[in-house]
Amino acid sequence: MPRVLSCIQPTGNVHLGNYLGALRNWVAGQHECDAFHGIVDLHALTVTDSPGVLGRNTLELAATLFAVGLDPDAATVFVQSHVPEHPQLGWIMECTVSYGELSRMTQFKDKAAKREADFVSAGLFTYPALQAADILLYDADEVPVGEDQRQHIEITRDIAERFNHRFGPTFTLPKVVTPKAGAKVTDLQDPTSKMSKSSSSEAGIVYLDDDPAAIMKKFKRAVTDSESEVRFDRATKPGVSNLLEILAACTGRTPDAVAADYSQYGPLKNDTGEAVVSVLAPIQERYRELLSDRAELARLLRVGADKARAVASRTLERAYTNIGILPPT
Ligand code: TYM
């Protein structure tokens, strides 16, 4: 059974890009693999600076992960800070990656540029080293993510290879897995940019907890183009192609097959909105139920952390032994 690991940051509302690019695929694969899914609160610290926010976001994100369908009996859902092996191996990863490699990370360049005059932490720069630790601690074979994470999984492979070369076989080299449709959901108002929590316009982002009227409004106002032909072509028709890909992802078809059903933008926008509403409605209901029992959520996270630690502590031990760190007596 392949070991699968993927994580998400508790940095605010989960959006449709997170769902179609990642969460949905975690759920789809959970019974055919040994799945580990982390809520990476320490990663979120790179951009969080107000007290009290992180814990609340973490619990709400746990409710979201179970609401989208992660089954606590099948998948191990845990909070990163509950497993101290993450920052421990993270430091070793920082010593295995170079300044030059980290400087080439497009996510760092984008995020640092967006923060402009804001504080840009060293953690934002060394972020991929901690992410490598998240993955390598679990000997993950596959990492199901959206397209924007590809470079981070590639650097994880490079780090693992370098470590194995220096200290002997220690880590499994992970493979990136992206979905056929939904790997890069773009902003409805700016369809050449990915849908992102840090987008400037709320109108372009569909949140998992948006009500049906808000979702329909966002899709009806989605930016398309001045032609009228419905065709899947990311390069010249990014807005229309994004709608086709979202509708395809929601209905289990291909964007080209969906395109063949439409000759006008209006019905495409309407049907895409309706498809998203019907996918999200049951998730929203389960989310509310789950969040009403915070003690049960906390219990599930405790069980998850115990299972995660059992695996992570063995891997960290192996890394320490292979490096030859003097064990305490
Ligand atoms: P994060 O929290 O930004 O996003 C979580 C997941 O959602 C995917 N995603 C998207 N997919 C399609 N279209 C979009 N517009 C879109 N926006 C986000 C992301 O690709 C991701 O799969 N660095 C990671 C968190 C992380 C991680 C890990 C992931 C930390 N450690 C180990 C995998 C393995 C991040 O910031 O994801």
Image (spheres, rainbow, N blue to C red):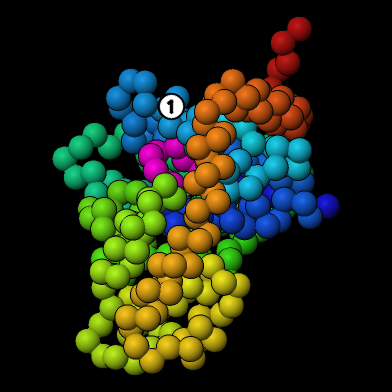
Is disc 1 placed on a helix, strand or loop? helix
Left or right: residue 13 compared with residue 145: left
Is residue 30 highlighted in magenta?
Answer: no
Q: Residue at x 36, y 21 (%)?
A: 52
Q: Position of residue 143 (x, y in %)?
A: 63, 53
Q: Position of residue 97 (x, y in %)?
A: 51, 43
Q: Position of residue 148 (x, y in %)?
A: 45, 59
Q: Residue at x 52, y 28 (%)?
A: 292
Left or right: residue 242 compared with residue 247: left
Residue annotated with mark 1: 56
**Which image quarter: residue 134?**
top right
Left or right: residue 221 compared with residue 316: left
Residue stretch rendered in magenta on the structure = 7-14
Left or right: residue 310 compared with residue 211: right
**Which image quarter: residue 254?**
bottom right
Residue 61 can be seen in this image: yes
